[in-house]
Image: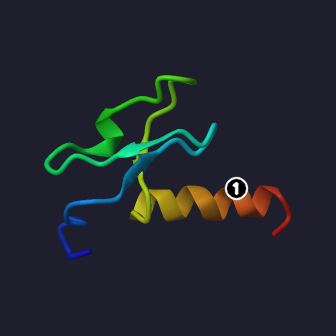
């Protein structure tokens, strides 16, 4: 990932609540999409926001 946040092509957009995953489409931000199952905003797997969410969830679980 470079300083502008571009992670390149490939990867997945994921829902941190229900685990839904879809292929990331180059040029489209995952954060502009919602999960079709639970309507939560999707995040790019491995992104800054994804890592923040995972850290917070681990703290809630006592990890």
Where in the figure is residue 48, as x and y percent of width and height?
A: 41, 64
The reply, left or right, for residue 30 in relation to residue 34 is left
Residue at 25% across, 45% down: 29
Where in the figure is residue 6, as x and y percent of width and height?
A: 20, 65
Residue at 20% across, 75% down: 3
Give the quarter of the image for residue 62. bottom right
The reply, left or right, for residue 29 in relation to residue 33 is left
Farthest-out residue, bottom = 2
The reply, left or right, for residue 31 in relation to residue 55 is left
Q: Residues within 10 Å of mark 1 (few under 14, many from 20)?
A: some
The reply, left or right, for residue 9 in relation to residue 50 is left
Q: In this picture, is 4 found above or below 23?
A: below
Residue at 34% across, 32% down: 33
Give the quarter of the image for residue 47. bottom left
Residue at 81% across, 70% down: 63
Q: Nearer the viewer, residue 43 or 36?
A: 36
Q: Nearer the viewer, residue 12 or 2?
A: 12
Give the quarter of the image for residue 11. bottom left
Q: Residue beneath label 1, please?
A: 57
Q: In this picture, is 52 found above or below 16?
A: below
Where in the figure is residue 7, as x and y percent of width and height?
A: 25, 66
Element marked by disc 1 = helix
Q: Image quadrant for the N terminus?
A: bottom left
């Amino acid at each position: 990932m470079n300083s502008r946040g571009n992670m390149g092509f490939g990867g997945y957009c994921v829902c941190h609540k229900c685990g839904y995953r879809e292929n990331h489409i180059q040029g489209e931000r995952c954060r502009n999409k919602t999960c079709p199952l639970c309507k939560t905003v999707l995040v790019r797997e491995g992104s800054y926001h994804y890592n923040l969410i995972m850290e917070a969830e681990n703290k809630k679980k006592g990890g």
